[in-house]
Amino acid sequence: MPNMSLNKLPMPEQDPNIRNKNFEEVSLGYTEEMAIEEANRCLNCKHKPCVNGCPVNVRIPEFIAEVQKGNFAEAYRIITSTNALPAVCGRVCPQESQCESKCVRGIKGEPVAIGRLERFVADWYMKNGTDKIEPIASNGHKVAVVGAGPAGLTCAGDLARKGYEVTIFEAFHDAGGVLIYGIPEFRLPKDIVKREIEKLKQLGVKIMTNMVMGKVLSVDELFEMGYESVFIGSGAGLPSFMGIEGEGLVGVYSANEFLTRINLMKAYKEDYDTPIKKSRAVAIVGGGNVAMDAARCAKRLGAEHVYIVYRRSEEEMPARLEEIHHAKEEGIEFMLLTNPNRIIGDENGLVCGMKCVKMELGEPDASGRRRPVEIKGSEFIVDVDSVIISVGTSPNPLIRSTTEGLEANKRGCLVADESMKTTKEGVYAGGDAVTGAATVILAMGAGKTAAESIDHYIQNQ
Amino acid sequence: MFEIKNKRILNENVVLLEVYAPFIAKKAQAGQFIIFRVDEKGERVPLTIADYDRENGTITIIFQTIGKSTKRLAELNAGDYILDFVGPLGKASHFDGVKKACVIGGGVGCAIAYPQAKQLHEMGVEVDLIAGFRNKDIVILEDEMKAVSNRLIITTDDGSYGKKGFVTNALQELIDEGNRYDIVIAIGPVPMMKFLCDVTRPYKIHTMVSLNPIMIDGTGMCGGCRVTVGGETKFACVDGPDFDGHLVDFDELMRRNSFYKKEETRSANCRLMGGTENA
């Protein structure tokens, strides 16, 4: 008999007033009993609408049926047949707009907590799983992957499973891309990312860190080295600024710089050398997941006031609902319909305030969202000593500027068709490098598609 | 892991290391830099490439021990390993059409000026080199610089060696003597570069400076190294590190370079007092 509760079973969490002072994980995950109870809310629909909502087509009702029976190892096997990073996806996917948005239980009440169940299964397996991953016999073909983020890791994993000898070239000193430099520990523990990557290595994937492609090696040189195809998953790491007065003041960060210092370089830990400013009051400009992450990090570093300054209303915010909710619980203050037009510095060039103007929503713009319009005469000054700019990123130009024949559009995104094939023979690309900043799971979907295409390309040479 | 092949102490605060990094050595050019991280808990710190040996696969770095990370690096010896070493980053310097150049280094900046002078010299350009130091005790690379220049002028602030005075005076004298340079390359402390630009501006001599702002990734990702050049925001790591000195907003650069002054002093002191020793 299914569990007919209208609501998802809540997931235990750290108390907001305790967690906003530490970097430990916020959500604690289901117990076995809780997972089975929630799994029993799944109706195991024949037409499986949830699967269509997932960019990597996780066989959702099948894995949930195994959770219902307590066969967690089997559930894990089903998930990982299409998703190489379940512990990551269970934590950071925007489930509410993907699988869970299609769930039949969501018509009346809340959908099944698919994300929480995926996370449970992945975590259970990390603790209890025993299967050893055997390296797969080589098919004699070599493929190079640029970037060890979600797109590159997925593409590499899928190709390795098909027998390809895959080498990933990563610019940073650790693999993981945005999973390690961008998403904070309290949302995605780095240990989990490390373990997922460890599994790829067991499959035979080689990872070379400290390799800035486009500088130390060009794409053409990779072909000369015997790689038959190259996948570019270099992400969208170039930060945008607003072009307003005062962005060069001391105390103004891009969200990338702030988060990289904290997540990759562990600036919040006393025994690490990376410096970070301890601010009294911080404004984060932007309304995406990155803005929420930056705000919650700033709070954890001890700021008294942390403001999210966003020019539209909460309804248009691109961040996941759960992140907005968690941020509010932790005491982040939301300044909606507010746009900064100048950052103010003191006589030493240190940030001491930000001048903002109130906005109202007008007619819809090209994005389909109502366009924010300034309210004349509504200027005011927010008292802050740090400003973090989180208004988006675009693809890094390093690779396209050093690779002949690789075309990009005017936003700097690599041009790729639906099979992830670029304009250069043998070169495939996917993830944020192609779409501009998007989600982890979409990048993984692109990595999967590219792996299929690369396999097809090499086998038909 | 990157092995240190050779170490030379150039003066009490300046150390030269040759690091085995064959991929980087294959590609490195004058004007480019690397980023190192001594160990797991260390910072990522940019350093200009002072020299490279494509055959032996080594990169030479010369650095002053100022912060905690450079002090840790200076403690390593030949045979030891650096955890991370990434590059070559930044744009290489280009000197097309240059016939006569004046290369100026200030203190440890000479380590960066040297490869530029060397490249120009190898191209057959007439090179005057001015190297400025506080005093005789900290003079570095004298023989090396002499070998790649037509004329080497060493200045010391206190007159204890070479010519007494600042590099700005020496440059002004050379210009007054009638030397006409196609390019002046100025590398050293930010105030020195700023004042050298003031010297060359009235003569409209193209003046190139090498900037070393706060930086993390070195690939254009963090935006920490942004500098205003000709009113535009540039990232020193990918658009530089060389820029037209007459267009650089030096005052903003000096302010931004002091971003973590307080935090860095604390970190270095902790280390000195044995407070937070890394395992």
Image (cartoon, coloured by chain):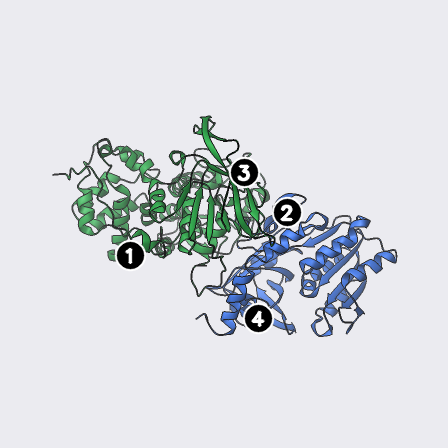
Chain colours: A green, B blue
Q: What's the mark number on residue B74?
A: 4
Is residue A389 visible from the viewing direction of this image?
Answer: yes
For the residues beneath circles 2 and 1, the answer to whether they share a chain is: no
Question: In the figure, A293 relative to B112: above or below?
Answer: above
- The answer to whether residue A166 is left or right of residue B152 is left
For marks 3 and 1, give the CA distance: 42 Å
CB atoms of marks 4 and 2 within 8 Å = no
Closer to viewer: mark 2 or mark 1: 2
Chain-order first, disc 3 or disc 1: 1
The three-letter code of the residue at mark 3 reads Gly
Closer to viewer: mark 3 or mark 1: 3
Give the image location of residue A381, x and y in percent: 51, 43
Judging from the image, what secondary structure is the residue with disc 2 in? Answer: strand
Total marks in image: 4
Is residue A176 visible from the viewing direction of this image?
Answer: no
- The answer to whether residue A261 is left or right of residue B155 is left
Question: In the figure, A295 relative to A336: above or below?
Answer: below
For the residues beneath circles 4 and 3, the answer to whether they share a chain is: no
For the residues beneath circles 4 and 2, the answer to whether they share a chain is: yes
Give the image location of residue A404, x and y in percent: 59, 40
Q: Which chain does tag 3 point to?
A: A
For marks 4 and 3, give the CA distance: 41 Å
Q: What's the mark number on residue B228?
A: 2
In the displayed image of the protein, which residue is found farthest to the left? A1
Which residue in the protein does label 1 denote?
A: A132
For marks 2 and 3, give the CA distance: 22 Å
Closer to viewer: mark 1 or mark 4: 4
For the residues beneath circles 2 and 3, the answer to whether they share a chain is: no
Q: Which chain does tag 2 point to?
A: B
Q: Quadrant of the N terminus of chain A?
A: top left
For marks 1 and 4, give the CA distance: 43 Å
The three-letter code of the residue at mark 1 reads Lys
